Structures are given as C-alpha cells and as structure tokens.
Amino acid sequence: MSHNTARKLDSKNAVLYLPDGQSIELPVFTGSENEGAVDISRLRSQTGHITMDPGYGNTGSCQSEITFLDGEKGILRYRGIPIEQLADKASFVEVAYLIVYGKLPNQTELDAFTDNLNHHALLHEDMKNFFSSFSGQAHPMAILSAMVASLSGYYDAASTAERSGDVDTNAARLISKIRTLAAFSYKKSIGQPFVYPDDSLSYCANFLQMMFAVPARDYEPDPVVVDALNLLLILHADHEQNCSTATVRTVASSHANLYASVAAGILALWGPLHGGANQKVIEMLENIRADGGNIKKFVDMAKDKDSGFRIMGFGHRVYKNFDPRATVIRKACDKVLDKLGIEDPVLDLAKQLEEVALSDDYFIERKLYPNVDFYSGIIYRAIGIPVNMFTVMFALGRLPGWIGQWKELMDDPTHRITRPRQIYQGQTAVDYVAIEDRV
Ligand code: ACO
C-alpha cells in the first residue's frame, strides 16, 4: 500500500502566515489513532522557509503501520496488540513475525518461519576468523555491527529497492545469525570454544546454549531463564521512530542493503542515551553501592546541571507518564530473581532510587520516570549475561523492528532519500587570503 495515499485528509487546512506577508495553506491529516499532522512538504518550495526542529521531537518522518505508542497514556502496541498481552502470551519468534509481516503467524506459518530460522543459524565458517582479529578490548557492539555489515559480503545483499535480493531470506538470516554472532563474540571474549546452534531448541534456548554450553559437560537451559529472555526480547522488539530505527530508515533511504542499514542501527543503539543505557544503569547502581549506598547524594548530583551526571535509565523522549515496558520488567524482575533464588542488593538500590527520584519535584516537574532499561540489566545479570553484552541483547530484541521498518520503507514507492535541511549561521562570503597575509 502507498502510505501517502492511505492517509485521511482533514476537511480544513492549516494556514501559516509568515512575517514577510506570505501565507500558505498546509494540508492536515489524521492517523488511525487520531494523531494529527500538518503536511509541510511544500513549505520550502512555495515560501523559501523551512521548519526548525532539533532532535525531531515534532517531526513525523514517515507513516507507519507497525507500532503505536502514546507517551502520555503509557500505551505501546505492536500491530495493534498491547505489549502487556504479547509479554504475557507470545514467543519472541511470533512477535518477530508479527512485526515483520504484519500479522500473528498461524501454526503452519510459525513452523515454516522457525524452520527458516534454524536453516540460517550457522555462520559461514570463514567468518569465524574475523573474531580473532578484534582486540581483546573491543566492545561487543563494535564486533556485532562489523559482523552484521560483513554478512553482506557473504550473501546476496542486493535487497535494495530494486528488490533483486530475497528480502524474506535475508530477514530470516539476520534474525537467526545475529544470535550466533552475539554468542560467538562472547565465547571469543572469554577464550572458550564456539558452540554451534542446535535446531531442536527454541530461539532463546538456542542462544543460551551457544552462550553458556561448553564441550566438557551437558548444558540444559533453565526454563525460568529462557522465559525471562523471551520477555526481554519481546519488550524491546520495536519502538517506532527511535534513534536507532530512524538511523536504519535513513540509511535504507539511500537504498543501502538490509545488513548495512541494520549495522548502522546497531551503532546508533550503542550510545548511552539510547540502548547503551542498560549497561550504564548497572554501572551506576554499582557505583552507588560502592560509594556506601547514599541515594540522595546521587539524586542531588543528577539535579545539579554542572555535575554532568544523569540518572541512567530515567527519562524518555516520548513517555511522559510511565514506560509500559518498565512496568512489565519491574514485576518480572522480582519474579525471576525469586525463582532463581538470587538476592541482588542492586535491585533494592534500584527500587530505593526509583522511590526517591519519583517523589522529588525535579523529576516530577520534568516527567522523568524509569524507562525500559532501568530494570532490564538486573534481569540480564541474574540470568548470567555479562554487563558489556547488555546492549547486544537489546540489539537482538530490536532486530525485528529494524527489519520491519526497513521493509516498510522499501515497500513504500513514495519514499525519498532522507536529507534534512539546515539554517546556516557561519561566516558570510569572504575572499581567500594568501598564507603570508594571514594574521
Ligand atoms: N537524570 C536527570 N535529569 C534528566 C534526566 C536524567 N536521566 N533525563 C532528562 N533530564 C532532565 C534534563 O536535564 C532536562 O532538564 P532541563 O529542562 O532543566 O534542562 C529535562 O530533564 C529534559 O531532558 P532532555 O535531555 O531535554 O530530554 P530528551 O527527551 O531530549 O532526552 C533521554 C531523553 C535522552 C532519554 C534523557 O532522559 C536521558 O538522557 N536519560 C538517561 C539515559 C537513558 O536512560 N536513556 C535510555 C532511554 S530509553 C531507550 O533508549 C531504550
């Protein structure tokens, strides 16, 4: 379907009056959940003006049918289905199918998709050599992005808008191989032999055995750990036009292939203001603990702009009430730690920090609440994932979203290359000065 023709135009236009006496009528349209938008696509050609919106907080870059979120009401739905229902009932593979293909799979479709994932789980043997070339200090996100980009050197990556590649095969390859790549980078970092995928296991159990099995003894993934991982991956599976997804779409808009676009998304996710926050949360909580657990000191520091310190895992560009994913994870955190018989003092610190911050005017006035990553690291740690792999886990979860959004963009014949404008504020025209005449 063409997204531009699908929109419902309102009967009245908006009118913009400019100081130079010009005015322009701008079409207004409404989304299926009644969000309104003013279409400014003819603004510059007709008036010479552009809009300024640093950070794009007020700019719609596309129309999408994948994810709906309402930051004021704390609503998140994939293809219309509330995140709470998916978290409670679905498997990550079902959710991946839902996001990429637009509907929940029936049993036959799910079986075929699962077979496809199993079929593509192995890496090309030559790729194993890559892992030896990274320094021992390399962050797993650096390795993951490089390896994902490298996949385009092994498979027909010509899945550009020309559609000469097989998009479905590349999507299944990526969803399956990213697990193997992530587990192999971990094994490499601790000097253990790679463990190959096992088709008889579920998506999450297969990943866990590649991470934690060793040739010397049998390994049976704990169902509590499998379920916890399944939940975390589902909660991260898509989040409409966030920083990394917008990056995937931007790269894809130049008709870059799926692997290249996703590799760019992984790098955007790495930043501590985005997916990298899950690692930073645990590091922050550990610092607070090492410092004697004085929560108020850290809350005061976060309020002091000169300190440069923020409470990691707090605040969100779009959620201004609560992050529904954080609500689900907070409950799961208690349950998982309890079932695994783990007492993590950092969980208590996190709860205290949440309580102190949420009753403080600074956080109340700015509508700063715990986000999805405030508690996710505590579960990851409880299930044995090392801290520097947390953001890799986020990437595993977010992959279906990146693929679904890449596909949606490629399927939209009206999409254009992403190319924002700017307002130049630099030096106006001056003549070149010969080096001997320069001061
Ligand atoms: N701790 C202390 N103060 C904060 C925090 C925080 N975590 N987050 C925002 N603020 C303050 C800002 O200093 C600013 O205050 P001011 O109005 O007095 O200047 C105000 O709240 C608004 O903050 P912005 O940075 O303008 O909000 P923005 O929407 O641009 O940023 C972001 C959102 C990046 C998530 C921010 O809240 C943040 O840095 N949080 C910590 C990092 C984090 O947890 N990131 C994960 C986000 S979720 C995800 O990507 C999966």
Image (cartoon, rainbow, N blue to C red):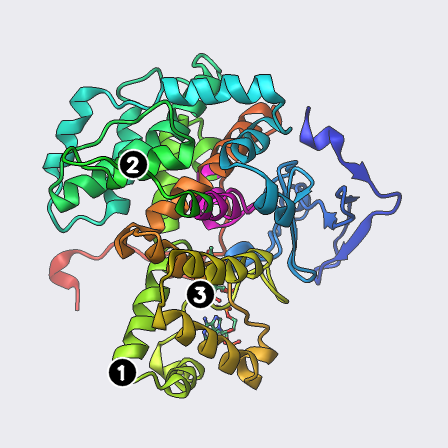
Secondary structure beneath label 1: loop
Q: Is residue 91 above or below residue 304?
A: above
Mark 1 and mark 3 residues within 8 Å of each other at the beta carbon: no
Reading the image, the residue beneath label 3 is 313
For disc 3, does the CB lie below 8 Å from ligand 1?
yes
Which three-letter amino acid code belongs to the residue tagged 1? Asp
As for residue 177 lying within the magenta part, the answer is no
Distance from label 3 to label 2 (Cα)?
29 Å
Which three-letter amino acid code belongs to the residue tagged 3? Gly
Q: Quadrant of the N terminus?
A: top right
Q: Is residue 405 above or below residue 434?
A: above
Specify the label residue 209 is tagged with: 2
Secondary structure beneath label 2: helix
Q: Is residue 332 left or right of residue 9?
A: left
Closer mark to the observer between disc 2 and disc 1: 2
As for residue 236 lying within the magenta part, the answer is yes
In this view, the residue in front, 261 or 355, is 355
First in sequence, mark 2 or 1: give its number: 2
Reading the image, the residue beneath label 1 is 291
Secondary structure, magenta segment, majority class: helix
Closer mark to the observer between disc 3 and disc 2: 2
Dividing the picture into quadrants, the one containing residue 432 is: bottom left
Closer mark to the observer between disc 1 and disc 3: 1
Specify the label residue 249 is tagged with: none
Q: Which residues are magenta?
A: 228-249
**Could you tell me residue 210's position as x and y percent?**
27, 35
Distance from label 1 to label 3 (Cα)?
19 Å
Which three-letter amino acid code belongs to the residue tagged 2? Gln
Secondary structure beneath label 3: loop
Dividing the picture into quadrants, the one containing residue 262 is: top left
Is any part of residue 22 visible from this angle? Answer: yes
Q: Is residue 400 left or right of residue 431?
A: right
